[in-house]
C-alpha cells in the first residue's frame, strides 16, 4: 500500500518490517482458521509475490522547465497470503471489501506482510481520489487506488528540440527488500488511457519494466515502472516557428536586389530584432540548459548571418562612397548567387546531421 495513507497504517507497516528484520524473517504469523502454516510468506524462504499494475488515465500537464509531469493514475496491487484467508461459510460470501487502512491493521494484527510501496519519482503530495481492497476467502488481495500527483522526469533531453522524443516513467518501489517481497508486472492492467487530455504531446509506446533498485532499507528492492514516450505536434512548430523563420530568410535574401545599401541596412536591422524576440520566446519554454538544442543552434546561426548581412552592406556602402562601385556590385552579385543561399544550406545541413542524425 502507499505510504501516503493514514499514519496508523504507516506505523503498522514499518513496525512489521522492523520485526521481520529483527527476527531474520521468521515471523510466527498464525492463520486464524487452521492454527498454523508450514510455509509463511514474506520470508527469505518464501517471499511474498506481488503483482503491480500501473495505468495512467490522464496527463494533466507537462512542465518542461521543472522537468516533471502531473498525472491521474490507477494502481492495482495483487498478492496472495494464506494468513489472510477466511472461512466463506462463516462469513457468508467469497470475498470481503475493506478500507485499505482497515485491511492493513487487520494484516498487522495477525502478523501478515502488507506489501507497502513508494512512488520513487514522486515530487508532490499524492491525492487519493478512490481506494479499496478486496480480500478473497483464499487470502488473495486486490488493492486498487486512483490518485493524482506530480512526478519527476529527469530523463528529458532537449538536444533535438522540437524534434525530440522524451521519456516518462512512473516507478513503484517496494519498501521491503527483495528477499521478503518480490514484484511482477500486471501487463493487462497497465498502460495509457485512451483520453489522456494532453494536447501538446503525442504519448505512446507504453511498456512495463521490472528491475531491482536500492530501496529505503538500503538493500535491493523490487521496482515495477511504467515507461512511455512523448513527441511533439510538429504542426505547431512548422506554423509558428519554421514558417516565420523561412520568411525572414527570404526577406534577407531579397535585400540584395535593392540598389540602396542604406535601405538594406535598415531592413536587416529590423530582422535582427525579430530574431532576438524569437530567441526569448523559445527559451521561455525550456529550462536554462547547459547545451544548445537544434532550434537554438539554427536561431543563433540565423542571428549571426543577419548581423553579418548588416556588416556586409555597410562594407558595400563604404566601397560605393569611396568610388569603387564596380567592386561593390561584383561582391553583391557573388553574395546573391553563392554566399547567402549556400551559407544557410550549410547551416541547416550541419544542424540536421549534428543534432538529429548523430546519436
Image: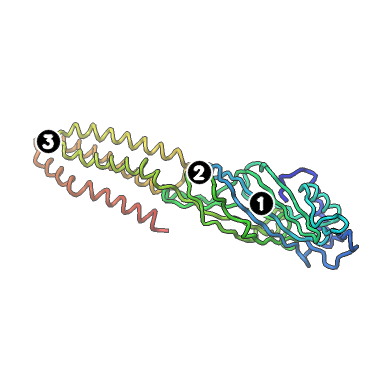
When asked about the image quadrant of residue 111, the answer is: bottom right
- Crowding at dot 1, Cα within 10 Å, few <14 / some 14-19 / many 20+, comes out as many
- Crowding at dot 3, Cα within 10 Å, few <14 / some 14-19 / many 20+, comes out as some
Per the image, label 2 sits on a secondary structure element best described as: loop
**Dot 1 or dot 2, earlier in sequence:** 2
Alpha-carbon span between mark 3 and mark 2:
51 Å
Tell us which disc is closer to us: 1 or 2: 1
**Dot 3 or dot 2, earlier in sequence:** 2
- Residue 228, x across and y down, in percent: 54, 54
In the image, taking residue 225 as reference, residue 292 lies left or right, namely: left
When asked about the image quadrant of residue 183, the answer is: bottom right
Per the image, label 3 sits on a secondary structure element best described as: helix
Residue behind mark 3: 320
Tell us which disc is closer to us: 3 or 1: 1
Residue behind mark 2: 64
Per the image, label 1 sits on a secondary structure element best described as: strand
Amino acid at each position: 500500500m502507499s505510504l501516503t495513507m493514514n499514519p496508523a497504517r504507516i506505523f503498522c507497516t514499518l513496525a512489521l518490517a522492523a520485526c521481520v528484520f529483527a527476527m531474520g524473517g521468521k515471523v510466527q504469523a498464525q492463520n486464524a482458521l487452521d492454527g498454523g502454516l508450514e510455509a509463511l510468506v514474506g520470508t527469505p524462504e518464501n517471499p511474498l509475490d506481488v503483482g503491480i499494475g500501473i495505468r495512467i488515465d490522464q496527463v494533466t500537464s507537462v512542465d518542461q522547465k521543472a522537468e516533471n509531469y502531473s498525472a491521474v493514475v490507477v494502481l492495482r496491487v495483487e498478492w496472495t497470503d494464506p494468513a489472510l484467508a477466511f472461512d466463506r461459510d462463516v462469513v457468508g460470501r467469497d470475498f470481503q471489501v475493506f478500507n485499505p487502512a482497515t485491511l492493513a491493521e487487520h494484516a498487522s494484527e495477525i502478523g501478515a506482510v502488507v506489501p507497502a510501496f513508494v512512488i520513487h519519482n514522486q515530487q508532490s503530495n499524492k491525492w487519493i481520489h478512490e481506494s479499496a481492497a478486496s480480500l478473497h476467502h483464499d487470502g488473495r488481495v486486490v488493492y486498487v487506488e486512483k490518485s493524482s500527483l506530480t512526478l519527476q522526469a529527469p530523463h528529458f533531453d532537449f538536444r533535438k528540440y522540437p524534434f525530440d522524443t522524451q521519456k516518462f516513467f512512473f516507478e513503484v518501489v517496494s519498501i521491503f527488500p527483495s528477499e521478503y517481497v518480490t514484484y511482477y508486472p500486471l501487463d493487462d492492467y497497465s498502460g495509457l488511457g485512451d483520453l489522456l487530455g494532453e494536447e501538446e504531446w503525442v504519448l505512446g509506446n507504453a511498456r512495463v519494466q521490472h528491475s531491482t533498485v536500492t530501496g529505503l532499507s538500503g538493500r535491493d528492492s523490487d521496482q515495477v515502472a511504467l515507461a512511455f514516450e512523448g513527441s511533439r505536434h510538429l504542426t505547431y512548430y512548422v506554423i509558428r516557428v519554421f514558417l516565420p523563420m523561412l520568411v525572414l530568410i527570404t526577406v534577407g535574401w531579397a535585400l540584395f536586389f535593392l540598389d540602396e545599401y542604406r535601405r538594406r541596412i535598415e531592413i536587416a536591422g529590423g530582422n535582427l530584432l525579430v530574431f532576438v524576440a524569437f530567441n526569448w520566446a523559445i527559451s521561455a519554454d525550456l529550462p536554462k540548459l547547459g547545451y544548445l538544442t537544434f532550434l537554438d543552434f539554427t536561431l543563433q546561426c540565423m542571428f549571426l548571418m543577419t548581423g553579418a548581412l548588416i556588416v556586409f552592406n555597410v562594407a558595400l556602402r563604404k566601397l560605393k562612397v569611396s568610388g569603387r562601385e564596380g567592386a561593390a556590385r561584383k561582391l553583391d552579385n557573388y553574395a546573391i548567387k553563392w554566399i547567402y543561399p549556400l551559407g544557410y544550406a550549410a547551416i541547416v545541413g550541419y544542424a540536421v546531421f549534428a543534432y538529429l542524425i548523430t546519436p
